[in-house]
Image (tube, coloured by chain):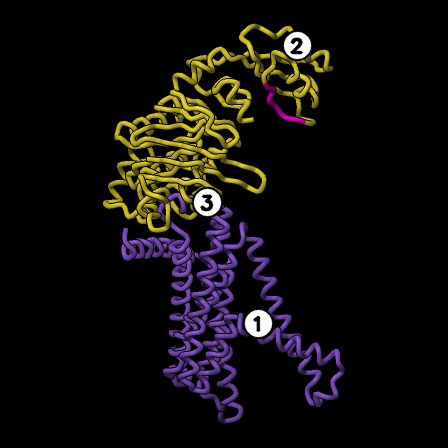
Amino acid sequence: MNRVDTWRFRWQLARTIGRRDLHVAIYDIRLYATLSATIAIAATLLRNDVESIQGNGFVILSNPLLIPLFGAAVVSSIYLAVASTTTVARERERGTLEVLFYGPVDAVAYLLGKVLAQMGVYALMVAVYLAALALYALIINFVFALNLLLAALLSVATTSAVVTVGILLSTLHRSVRSALLTLLAIALAFLGVQLGHDHVCSLTSGMARGDYNPLLLALQTLFTWLDRIFNSLSPLAYLKRGFDVLLRGSVAEYVLTMGLSLLYSAVAFGLAVWTLRRKGVR
Amino acid sequence: MIQTDTLTRRYGNLTAVNALNLHVRPGEVYVLLGPNGAGKTTTLLMLLGILPPSSGSIRLFGLSPVPGNYYAIKRRVGVVGEKQHFYDDMTVRQYLRFFADLYAVEKADERIHSLMEAVGLSDCPDVRPRGGSPGMKQKLAFVRALLPDPDLLILDEPTSGLDLSGICQVRQLVQAQSQAGKTVLISSHILSAVERTAHRVGIVHRGRLLSENTSAGLHARLAGAQQIDLELADPCPDLPQDLARLPFVRAVEGPTGENARRFTVHLTGDTDMRAQLSRAVTVQGGVIVAMQPKEIRQADTRVTITEGDIPRLVGQTKARAAA
């Protein structure tokens, strides 16, 4: 087999695996629970805007539909992070991963199939959100602007980073339980740094840097660095950055954020393939 | 068809497969026979590219299993693993269709239908395998393995957990593959009806291929061996070690600790040693409830190979060398 045939066959394998996983996800009640909850949250946010208009007579928002879409993208990312973190670990735990590798499946085709399935689920979710937002826009007479579509497109790139990181975590574990505990620990670490940074900043606000207690200064420096590191590692931070960029209307920064998210996904995918090869399928 | 050169796999300090030189010819039914923990499954996993070897080389179909040859090799191999794992959400038909798509099987539905009929699964296409019997799961695994019409069929402990009729069906399947000119590699610790279809049997012990023989040759070596099943009134944890020291005892198998009530004693000669054995047990404080002699004959359906059988199968010199 030459290189082209190899990739063609690998793509066919990935599609078959992805189709199976997508089929399983579509018949999973949790997907619909997430969709319903997210649409309800979006409706609540828009209702707040409408009430604000009713109360004040006006509201200043560059695109009122962007914030509900951002919230929906965050909730979907959390759902997909959990789903992708369990996907490989579950197959390994049940022994079905080894059976797949008895056949012509290799690490690249298998993980590509997993990514395709999760991205298929997100594509479905985002289509539902856009449809719901379009309906809301029609009802309350808000503008369904082009940058909403750009935001949705950007969220696909940032979600691919969430999915590949989840799959990377999944390849590291032999049980669903340990994979989920690792995800929880990482999420708590991110949250802890974010809260710690905000708290230290609130303590020092209004103070001149020279007036800081040395311990407070050290803490502020530490949390600032940790916050920067975690912000560059968190796929959700890319999503937030991307939506900020859209609000500012900077095309160059939008393209950069999109490119960085895709690069992030590619690196996480490469690491996942390497990990699966190293750890094996048992 | 399969060629390994000083194939070795280590897990830390443990060498699971030790410089294995295996040569299986096209169209051959070859059995890797050895007790549990001999390194058979590790060997198969290395052949399949699931475990990387620590050293040595493998060639399948004359190809080295480098990434460029991965698909060319794997599309020609069918595997039935020791344990069967299926997707809970799929029926038999959906499961087979999924694997047919993975192998890019042409006219998949026809192929699935004919294979299901051949193994007697045609009446349960919409059943979920999870609730099926071991025999049904084994059949399904066979159909999955045969979907791509493989040139090489690898079976890991194919008769494990099967009843007599299941074993006969597996034997028929292996014979059919052999008659179709396919190569079959079987790993087993049981010399059963299936393994008797083998052209050659390789005895593996502690990761080494100690000798190769025909199936008939092996049975001739095993014939006349004596085993005695012992059952005691109360647990006797030290008894296995004490009995193993007796000159006419080759090996003692059985549980240890509080459960040490039932043992299988392998004897060295073919003379009746029951009286001596009974005396030895009584001296050690054991009270015998039952003593059942068992002689392995050519016609026996299943002979489980234990460490104690290795000297008889390959000769004392080779067995000592492996130890």
Q: Are marks 1 and 2 in contact (CB under 8 Å)?
A: no
Depth check: give the residue in front, B132 or A151: A151
Residue at the spot 42% in from the left edge and 32% down from the top edge: B21
Give the residue number, with chain letter if any, for mark 2. Answer: B278
Depth check: give the residue in front, B122 or A139: B122
The reply to the same-chain question for discs 3 and 1 is no
Judge whether A78 appears above or below A139 on screen: above
What amino acid type is highlighted by mark number 3? Answer: Pro
Secondary structure, mark 2, is: helix
Give the residue number, with chain letter if any, for mark 1. Answer: A230
Pinpoint residue A202: horizontal percent, then vertical percent: 68, 83
Number of other residues with Cα within 10 Å of mark 1, as a class: few under 14, some 14 to 19, many 20 or more: some
Residue at the spot 68% in from the left edge and 13% down from the top edge: B281
Looking at the image, residue B256 sits to the left or right of residue B307; the answer is right
Q: CA distance from mark 3 to mark 1?
A: 36 Å
Q: Is residue A261 visible?
A: yes
Indicate the colour of chain A. Answer: purple
Image quarter for residue A257?
bottom left
Task: Tell me the magenta residue range.
Answer: B251-256
Q: Earlier in the sequence, mark 2 or mark 3?
A: 3
Give the residue number, with chain letter if any, for mark 3. Answer: B52
Q: Are marks 2 and 3 in contact (CB under 8 Å)?
A: no
Q: Are marks 3 and 1 in contact (CB under 8 Å)?
A: no
- The answer to whether residue B253 is magenta is yes
Residue at the spot 46% in from the left edge and 85% down from the top edge: A247
Judge whether B263 appears above or below B27 on screen: above
Nearest-to-viewer mark from 1 and 2: 1
